[in-house]
Amino acid sequence: MYGLPRTIFTEEHDLFRDSIKDFIAQEISPNNAQWEKNKMVSRESWKKLGDNGFLCIQAPEKFGGLNIQDFRYNAIFIEELGLSGCSGPAIGYPLHSDIVFPYILHYGTEEAKTKYVPGMVSGDLISAVAMTEPGAGSDLQNIRSTAEEMEDHFLINGSKTFITNGYLSDIVVVAAKTDPTKGAKGISLFLIDKDMPGFSKGIPFEKVGLHAQDTCELFFEDVKVPKHNLLGKIGMGFNYLMTELAQERLIVALSALALAESTFQTTVDYVKNRPAFGKMVSDFQNTRFKLAEMAAKLEQARIYCDQLVVLHNDKKVDPAMASAAKYTMTELQCDVADECVQLHGGYGYMWEYAVARAYADARVQKIYAGTNEIMKELIARKILK
Ligand SMILES: Cc1cc2nc3c(=O)[nH]c(=O)nc-3n(C[C@H](O)[C@H](O)[C@H](O)COP(=O)(O)OP(=O)(O)OC[C@H]3O[C@@H](n4cnc5c(N)ncnc54)[C@H](O)[C@@H]3O)c2cc1C
């Protein structure tokens, strides 16, 4: 589709790409419509991903992982899921491997790692990260959930909302205030597992898009969390979130671009086959120009994202760079989805058409993982410091 060659991948990466492509074609794409009706992917799909070595590939071998420290593999996984157009899986699986897992890897105690990482690698344990509360989203410092330190445990109370993978989650990274008198410095992170008494879940939300995603509320009522389930140090939670959110934002950018490419390709196929005025829609100059404009922007974006993946491998992507990627790629995804609906005419507004679902699915990418307004604040902070 694109003119510029991609230069960041080796033959080994290409082989990995082929295997994930085959897996998606066999195990994900054929099931996605049913999962959208169920409001969640199947547990079995998680298990199959684990069996094939596609989850938490970074995990050390002693926990059953492949110990792959090359982010290009993670990027390929995210990209191929995006290219499949299956938006729920494209968000939920990488959230587990590339967003939640790093918290445990970087800040978890040996006890917690031993208990949870093997299950996360095998797909037996599904994970989520819970920061947002009904009263605090962008303003994370203002969360109300509390974690009171007792003699041999922490006592957690509060609730979280809009949690991706929430309904199926077995293990959740939860942000709570260990010192409610302090803002950011009063936040700590905990691992809460579904078997802990007092932890309960809402049912999956009715969302505008991302229907194959079990986004829901989580409730914590006097949940006793063992001390070894504290992540890192008390009061350092906000710092850890800010550190790890850079990778989360990069992942959203990568998924946004791949989903946009998928929507674009669907539209190219459509306009070549849709007759109007004795021609095909692809014969109109407006269509050709719109496709050309989108292709040019997507090509630029691809090179930009490839460069970010390489930089991230060298740990050189700072929060402002990740924010710029998340902001620009999600705007691009929404713009492409909008243009592509237009090129489909009325069919573009019908739910049975992939482009209509892509349009609905795209919208939230500008909202979660930090809204695009917050992304611009982070970029401006770097410019003006
Ligand atoms: C489908 C879905 C999945 C999600 N998954 C997760 C998840 O897995 N885990 C999790 O913790 N959260 C998750 N979220 C929550 C998401 O991260 C928040 O919704 C988001 O951070 C915005 O917070 P809010 O909804 O409270 O909006 P608010 O913070 O109330 O924002 C409302 C508006 O005000 C703007 N605004 C706020 N502050 C500023 C500012 N300083 N400057 C300029 N504008 C500002 C915002 O940009 C926005 O336009 C998810 C949300 C959705 C919809």
Image (cartoon, rainbow, N blue to C red):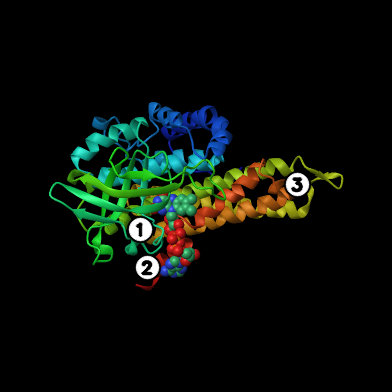
Can you identify the residue that label 1 sits on?
318
Tag 1 or tag 3, which sits nearer the N-term?
A: 3
SS assignment at label 2 = helix
The crowding category of the residue bearing disc 3, from other C-alpha atoms within 10 Å (few below 14, some 14 to 19, many at least 20), is many
Q: Left of 234 or right of it: where is 168?
A: right
Dots 2, 1 in contact, CB < 8 A: yes
- Disc 3/disc 1 C-alpha distance (Å): 42 Å
Which amino acid type corresponds to the residue marked 3 in the rendered image?
Ser
Can you identify the residue that label 2 sits on?
382
Tell me, yes or no, if residue 279 can be seen here.
Answer: yes
SS assignment at label 1 = loop
Q: Which circle marks residue 282 in the picture?
A: 3
Tag 2 or tag 3, which sits nearer the N-term?
A: 3
Where does the N terminus fall, quadrant-wise? top right
The percent coordinates of residue 134 (x first, y second) are: 41, 58
The percent coordinates of residue 314 (x first, y second) are: 33, 49
SS assignment at label 3 = helix
Most foreground residue, 34 or 45 = 34
Tag 1 or tag 2, which sits nearer the N-term?
A: 1
- Disc 2/disc 1 C-alpha distance (Å): 10 Å
Is ligand 1 within 8 Å of the beta carbon of the residue shown at mark 1?
no
Q: Residue at x 57, y 30 (%)?
A: 30
The percent coordinates of residue 32 (x first, y second) are: 55, 35
Which amino acid type corresponds to the residue marked 1 in the rendered image?
Asp
